[in-house]
């Protein structure tokens, strides 16, 4: 309740300040929320209250983000576990991983534009290439942190390699894997919007932002920003829920703090 009360106080202060200022550039949040509802969530119940504008705006963006996140998560976890279980492979690959992780994600988008041209493949590829590194690095570190004593016990019990992976390595690496997934999720949201801001895009939230800015439709601009914030919060909450189910609330709460 305290967390929601802080948010409520912030919204009320914003509402009062915007109404007192009366600026067209900073509309009140209630007006923004009303415009967002009329624009995207005033459809029939059979369509989950989504309007045709929502289908053309929200669903393509979520589809690109989901594809990029799934590919980045799958490749990052697989390669990270493989690299983390080999000291030699980790020593050889670690400088490259750290270099690739340090490159600003938006800086790579022009490279993918040249290689893949504009369109969905370029957008998904830019999301995957930028979002895979947090998952890969954290998965490798989690695999390296597996207790050697447990591995020795597994060898004594003659567990097979798949059994050691499933019962020892993955459970030990899960907290670090989910830390990488949360970073990757935020990068996917950023790259999804950024790739849709480029020329050649014809749908998505980023395209709606640039189109509304061109038409000086500030209410739509603020509505898109509100939508992005809500999507980020909901997706992060969903991932935290999955993490608590698989890892446990104690490690999730400790890492969040």
Image (tube, helix red, strand yellow):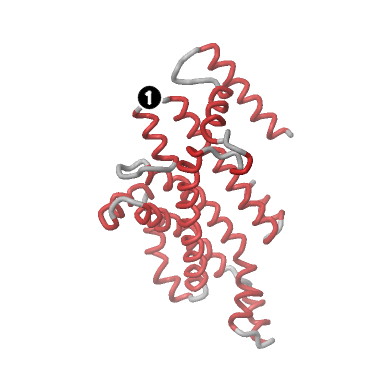
Say which element carries label 1. loop
Indicate the quadrant where residue 38 lies: top right
Identify the residue at horizontal 61%, vertical 72% (top origin).
169
Compared with 163, 61 (above or below) is above
Indicate the quadrant where residue 124 lies: bottom left
Q: Which residue occupies the foreground of this view, 79 or 194?
A: 194
Label 1: few (<14), some (14–19) or many (≥20) C-alpha neighbours in 10 Å = few
Q: Which residue occupies the foreground of this view, 76 or 88?
A: 76
Identify the residue at horizontal 42%, vertical 57% (top origin).
128
Image location of residue 210, percent across then percent down: 37, 34
| Residue identified by numbered label 1 | 216
Q: Which residue occupies the foreground of this view, 53 or 15?
A: 53
Compared with 87, 3 (above or below) is above
Instruction: Give left or right: position of 118 versus 257.
Output: left
Identify the residue at horizontal 47%, vertical 57% (top origin).
67
Numbered marks: total: 1
Instruction: Give left or right: position of 233 versus 52.
Output: right
Image location of residue 162, percent across then percent down: 59, 80
The N terminus lies in which quarter of the figure? top right
Instruction: Give left or right: position of 30 versus 189.
Output: right
């Amino acid at each position: 309740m305290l967390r929601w009360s802080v948010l409520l106080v912030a919204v009320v202060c914003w509402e009062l300040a915007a109404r007192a200022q009366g600026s067209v550039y900073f509309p009140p949040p209630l007006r923004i929320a009303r415009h967002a509802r009329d624009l995207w969530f005033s459809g029939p119940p059979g369509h989950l209250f989504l309007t045709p504008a929502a289908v053309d705006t929200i669903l393509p963006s979520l589809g690109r983000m989901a594809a990029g996140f799934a590919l980045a998560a799958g490749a990052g976890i697989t390669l990270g576990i493989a690299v983390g279980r080999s000291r030699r492979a980790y020593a050889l690959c670690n400088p490259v991983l750290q270099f690739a992780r340090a490159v600003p994600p938006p800086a790579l988008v022009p490279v993918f534009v040249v290689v893949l041209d504009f369109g969905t493949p370029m957008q998904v590829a830019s999301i995957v290439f930028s979002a895979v590194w947090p998952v890969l690095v954290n998965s490798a570190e989690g695999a390296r942190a597996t207790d050697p004593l447990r591995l020795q016990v597994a060898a004594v019990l003659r567990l097979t390699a798949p059994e050691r992976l499933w019962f020892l390595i993955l459970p030990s690496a899960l907290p670090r894997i989910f830390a990488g997934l949360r970073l990757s999720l935020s990068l996917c949201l950023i790259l999804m919007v950024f790739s849709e801001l480029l020329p050649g895009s014809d749908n998505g939230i980023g395209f709606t932002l640039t189109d509304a800015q061109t038409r000086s439709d500030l209410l739509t601009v603020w509505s898109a920003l509100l939508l992005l914030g809500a999507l980020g919060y909901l997706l992060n909450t969903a991932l935290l829920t999955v993490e608590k189910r698989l890892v446990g609330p104690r490690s999730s709460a400790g890492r969040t703090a």
